[in-house]
Amino acid sequence: MISVLDFTCSPEEAKDDAHLEKRIRKELQLAQNQNIAFRWRKRSIDARQKQIKINASMEVAIDTALAPRFHPTSFDILPKEAPSVHIIGAGPAGLFAALQAILQGFRPIIFERGKDVRSRRRDLAKLTKEHLLNPESNYCFGEGGAGTYSDGKLYTRSKKRGDVQKVLEWLVQFGATEDILVDAHPHIGTNKLPQLIEAIRAQIIVSGGQINFENKITDLLIQEKKITHIQVNYKEKIAVEKVILATGHSARDIFALLHQKNIEIKAKPFALGVRVEHTQAYIDSLQYHGRHNDAYLPPASYSLVTQVDNRGVYSFCMCPGGIIAPCATAPDEVVTNGWSPSKRNNIYANSGIVVGIEPTDFPDLKNPFVCLNFQKEIEQKCWEAAGKTQKVPAQGLQDFVNGQLTTHFPRSSYQPGFTSVNLKDIFPDFVYRRLCQAFIDFNRKMPGFITNDAVVHAPESRTSSPVLIPRDPITFQHLQIKNLYPIAEGAGYAGGIVSAAIDGINCLEKIAQTHLSV
């Protein structure tokens, strides 16, 4: 017999298998001579009260064995006559679209502007140590997409969009630990994601798909509202039947190309602000009521939100035990993001704190690039303020709220370095004022949050795409171009690894349905 048992326990008890077995036997009124096996089903922390609790959900097998958590998916080898789909971008949307394509009987042919995941690492090292930016291979561009070297968080609220469990199970199948099926806020870690991405690539190739690195799409040839060919690296023209656009939120050249071809795009709301770094021990103390460096608790995170002048301001991509990384994609801009290794064991904690930005904040409402242009303007102002380098403009958090220049910094994990800047001079008033009030509100929720021992880095600007590529909600086809399928973050329909992967899977299911009905 298999049972599911829910209970709460202390963090110490949750780490003690002998205690858990005793608790299970007591709750289920089992005799000592009855054989049981048990494992975690779901696990979360409740730190709202001083007595911190673990919410435990356990699967218990009584006088039988526990079945595997899931059965791995079998990806067959495609026949030679399998129809092709061309996928632009090898981020989570593109890769999971490719896996689903194989299941649906399509041969996925991927074009990725960046390098493979291992070669990409060398370009990140040059950016961090020498300020040398490769516009085609960086934290945003390359195999695995932006998430590969910025943490691999898997928490999503997109459960209505598709099969979250399927995405998580595929990630486990290709190398993630089963903990991601258990933890309430799962993540993989930057140190483990590259191997996982390589395993997915190997499966795509073994099954008969293709992945072409350093192949940038530079033109689309269109006839009768249909893409007939794609151009690669300004040279080769390749005939296509169906084109999945999975290019990510930073592929600005793709937005420009679509606009040039009179393919409709629209300005889209996004969010922009700063990335704030405390020490992890400090955040642990605030969240765990004085406990820190605790062997029984994971590094603490936080999720904060408030409304200022009818606009949301919230924490974004919080990285316990993390690092702030340089994530520019062009040489004349500064961009920040955060990541954590799998153990989240660095001494810093960082999070984006961002303000919602609307197209109506600007006068030129008909311009599809109005939000993108604002994003670029802030990033370029930060580059100028940092001496036209990849150093980051920075300020103590208390000084930021008070509008004062910081003269002494405790530290920063941002390896290219930082420059003291009064960030009031970077952001327009409608952003700066809302950030200041939000920090005051957050300090009420987490007393001590505002301190000059916390460092503000600017900007956090690549939260999502500032451009929407319209598509039919039923078929996923672009409203004008019959065989163009814009998906995931770059098109404005997802916000993270899991939701992007779901969108890629859903897109192939839509294509398969259409293909069968023809």
Image (spheres, rainbow, N blue to C red):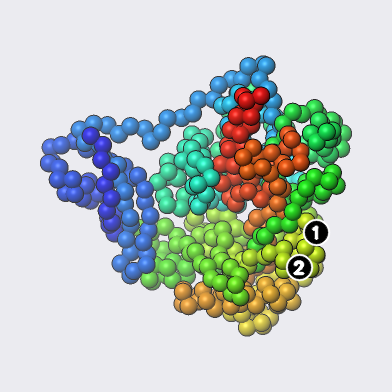
Q: Mark 1 points at which residue?
A: 367
Q: Where is residue 58 drawn, in percent x and y?
A: 30, 45
Residue positioned most to the top:
80
Q: Where is residue 108 drawn, in percent x and y?
A: 66, 29
Identify which residue, 244 or 404, lies in the foreground.
244
Mark 1 lies on a secondary structure that is: loop
Q: Where is residue 191 drawn, in percent x and y?
A: 55, 46
What residue sits 66% from the left and 82% below the top? Answer: 403
Decide if residue 40 is on the left or right side of residue 224.
Answer: left
What residue sits 42% from the left and 52% below the top? Answer: 184
Q: Pick whichever of labels 2 and 1 is earlier in the sequence.
A: 2
What residue sits 73% from the left and 42% below the top? Answer: 479
Q: How crowded is mark 2: few (under 14 residues within 10 Å), some or many (20 or more)?
A: few
Q: Is residue 397 visible?
A: no
Residue positioned most to the right:
235
The quarter of the rendered structure image containing the C terminus is top right
Q: On the image, which quarter does residue 272 sit in?
A: bottom right
What residue sits 50% from the left and 47% below the top? Answer: 160
Callout 1 amino acid: Asn
Q: Name the residue under label 2.
A: 362
